[in-house]
Image (spheres, rainbow, N blue to C red):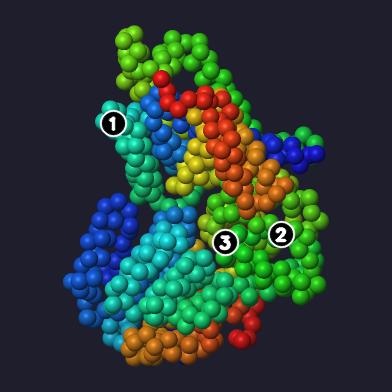
Amino acid sequence: MGIIFQLLFTGLGIGAVYALVALGFVLIYRATNVVNFAQGQFAMLGGYGMVITTVTLGLPYWLGILITLALMAVVGAIFNLGVYYPLRFRSFLPVVISTIGASILITNLVLALYGPEPTTLPGLTDYPGFSIGPVFFDSQYVAIIVISLILVVLQYVFFEHTLLGKKLQAVSQDKEMASLLGIRVSAMIMLTFVYSAVLGGIAGILVAPILFVSVGLGAQIALKAFAATIIGGFGDVAGAVVGGLTIGVVETLGAYYVSVPYKDAFAFLLLFLFLLLRPQGFFGEKIAEKA
Amino acid sequence: MAVFRPWKLGTASKTMTRRRTNGLGGILLAASFILTASGVARAADDEIEIGMATPLTGPAAESGKYGEWGAELAIAEINGQGGVLGRKLKLVIEDDQTTNPGIVAAFNRLASNPDIAVFLGSVRSTQVHAMDPDVRRVAKPVFIGGTDPNLTHMGNPWFFRCRPNDTYSAKVIADFGVHTLGFKKWALVTSTDAFGSSGNKLLTAELSALGASVVTSQGYANQTPDFTPVVLAIKGSDAEVIGSYFTYEQDLGVFARQLRQLGVRLPWVGSPSITDTAALHLAGPALWGTYGIADFNADSSPEAKRYAEAYQAAHHVPADQFSAWTYDAIHLAAIAIEKAKSTDPKALREAILSIRGYHGAEGTYDFDANGDGLHGYNVVKNDHGKIVFIKRVDFPPP
């Protein structure tokens, strides 16, 4: 019995990271109708930001987090201005290709600046974790799950109970109508990119102590996070979270009870089944295009 | 009989070129490819070119850098001694991107240069398999570090291995674990790629031959972010010891940490990656107390010690097998060219196969008819982060 709880705990921890990156995918999609394939690179940059601030510069961990997240906000703004904004009136495909190009550029810039070597990043705490019965709760996984839950709740409150959140929702639903109502659409989209980059950065900060910091960190997470957004229902915030957690748990249980080498296959089998049987995902509406 | 040569650094760097395939580098590469193909960029007549396909990017980029440094050190030594046949050696490097398509493309770019006499291929068996058809077509000697035994037993006469193959690694892991440590029940953790699969098969056979059993065998796909299912399977078995074949240090680091976090304290005897500099750095205390087999160890011979000191002085990191095999490969290529008195591929092949008793950094080279130069391993222990030599086990060439 202890084994299944251990697997569930680890699956939820990994799934929470997928969920954080998936949230970034969803927010940008809702605001711009575009899939940002550089979302995983935001996570990688978050990991490197922490290495530079806390390991190289020796700053306190909390200060490293603040500086890294501030830098991620800047990255999000630059990304919006450089990658999305010039192509905002073009169709879906050129913008998506632009984000793919940006992801390659970011990866190679990091490679050129910091080299290919993976490096370690200390966890949020030196405390390794605790056991309840046969289940070991790794402190980093606990932090990932707790912080992800807090972020989801804050995001819900922000979108549902603040004026700024409602403006963002209005922009995501109908940009022209939002503009006619006096909402500054470009500012809202800028805010969305900034927030998505920060979310990606948080995912990177949380997962880097487990997976190490390397240029491949983002790609490792992004593919599963993308699958999570589809399973959850593309464009749905709750769906991204549920999708991420589902993938994390399914691949971990599948690996233990069926086959470890086919661990990734379970995640993508789930994706395939959803595309076949419920293409709108957990929470998505069954419509082809947004109004 | 080859003589170990003292080195003189600093003379060869001007003759070395490196080409990367990213961004602007890709454009430059294309330009240099065109120039090379048209003969404009041919090496100077007094240089003998050696092509090297190595990972400069991708998950194995760190070990690729070490391999490059090892080869450069050997080139510097040889050129410092006046070169080969009175000509300097020149290293031409292509990035294999740590992928199979990447190494095929890298090798073909190198092979398009007719001045390249000898090549250094991959340390990863799966990549060597990918290169195989093109190497047969090009028909020039390629030194490899991949340890899948099949690589030199599949009818390709142009592969020459500078590391002991996994027949020996499995023999030594099994022998040490069963006879020295006294464990009969094994848990195996192996990558599902060519290297890991081959290691799994060979180690299972060797353990069976020694009367030991594999109580759980866990394969994993490379770049796995979470090893909890693997660790729990080991924990739930009655294994007394872990045997492993990890391809990438990052995977090994993640596994080692989770293994210890989840309370598994079993002894562990691993393939050479468990002793890598990168693995020691990433896994830290999680690897303390583990045993490994290592084709390179600084304390295994005077030649290995001298090499390790020179490498450390040049790069300020400890030498490991990723740099040692490329270092030896360049020296072996130089010896073969000297013996053959030409760069004719067939003459070089005969010269390489005739090398006996060459004391390299990795061990003593006695090439057999299949192209395997080494026939034994070192057994080492991770003593609080320091790799300590236990013993050298050599087998007679077949």
Dot 3: element? loop
Q: CA distance from mark 2 to mark 1?
A: 53 Å
Residue at image coords 62%, 48%: A263
Q: Is residue A150 among the parts visible in the rendering? A: yes
Q: Which mark is residue A90?
A: 1
Front position in the image: B118 or B270:
B118
Which residue type carries mark 1?
A: Arg
Instruction: Quickly name the residue at label 3.
Output: B193
Residue at image coords 50%, 77%: B161
The C terminus of chain A, quarter of image: top left
| Res B134 quadrant in image | bottom left
Q: Is residue A70 among the parts visible in the rendering? A: no
Residue B357, given in percent of the width and then of the height, sits at 52, 87
Which residue type carries mark 3?
A: Asp
Q: Earlier in the sequence, mark 2 or mark 3?
A: 3
Up/down of B227 relative to B155, above or below: above
The chain ID associated with circle 1 is A
Up/down of A63 relative to B205, above or below: above
Which residue type carries mark 2?
A: Ser
Q: CA distance from mark 1 to mark 3?
A: 43 Å
Disc 2 crowd rating (10 Å Cα; few below 14, some 14-19, many 20+) is some
Q: CA distance from mark 2 to mark 3?
A: 15 Å
Q: Are marks 2 and 3 in contact (CB under 8 Å)?
A: no
Query: Quick check: do tags 2 and 1 share a chain?
Result: no
Q: Which mark is residue B217?
A: 2
Q: Residue furthest left?
A: B40
Residue B334, given in percent of the width and then of the height, sits at 38, 82
Disc 3 crowd rating (10 Å Cα; few below 14, some 14-19, many 20+) is some
| Res B206 quadrant in image | bottom right
